Image (cartoon, rainbow, N blue to C red):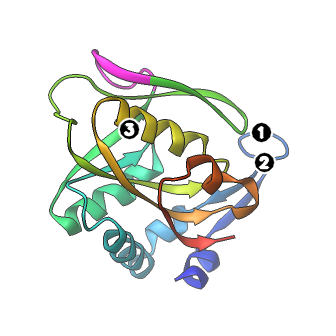
Amino acid sequence: MAGLIASLTREVSDFPQPGVEFKDLTPVFADATAMAAVTTALAGFAAEADLVAGIDSRGFLVAAAVADRLGTGVLAIRKGGKLPPPVHAVEYDLEYGSAILEIPADGIEFRGRRVAIIDDVLATGGTLAAAAGLLRRVGAQVTVAGVVLELTGLGGREMVAPLQVHSLCPM
């Protein structure tokens, strides 16, 4: 699995700002065999969840496929300003600035739901930690996180501990 993902990952220097080596998983998602393998593997980790949450925006792609595979609902954890009010929000720091994540405050009951969080890349862990904290704040039980690619040298796993994180391709 890791070899397949690594072989299809495109590396983009100095994006979104100088000094950042961006890992573009778009080719992984566009490859039918790779996408099916990623979906199956992440669904295995998330099997106990009754809701799959994907982090804006590439996490949406994989989370929707995993939710479909598991027969659960999917939640889009959005960047600030993308959802109609009212929202639950959290502001957090990431490796090249700060951001806001939001989820709907109406229409979805989170209390007691077992939620698996899915994202494309785990880097410093700020986004995943913020998403998990936001979901816990509204009463959800965040049971597991799954990522396609993990940049192991950036300490993301430690940032989200004790949340169990499954990575398909540690780099």
Q: Nearer the viewer, residue 101 or 5?
A: 101
Q: CA distance from mark 1 to mark 3?
A: 24 Å
Q: In this figure, which residue is indicated by the disc labeled 2?
A: 20
Q: Are marks 1 and 2 in contact (CB under 8 Å)?
A: yes
The location of residue 97, given as percent across then percent down, is 70, 29
Query: What secondary structure is found at the residue carrying circle 2?
Result: loop
Q: Residue at x 32, y 20 (%)?
A: 87
- Mark number displayed over residue 29: none
- Of residue 66 and residue 159, the one placed in the foreground of this image is 159
- Residue 50, compared with residue 70, is above or below; it is above
Type of secondary structure dominating the magenta stretch: loop
Q: Give the residue at mark 1.
A: 17
Q: Please provide the residue range marked out in magenta.
A: 80-89
The quadrant of the image that shows the C terminus is bottom right
Q: CA distance from mark 1 to mark 2?
A: 6 Å
Quadrant in the picture for residue 96: top right
Residue 25 coordinates in the image, percent (x, y):
56, 63
Label 3: which residue? 77
Who's the residue at 70% across and 63% down the image? 152
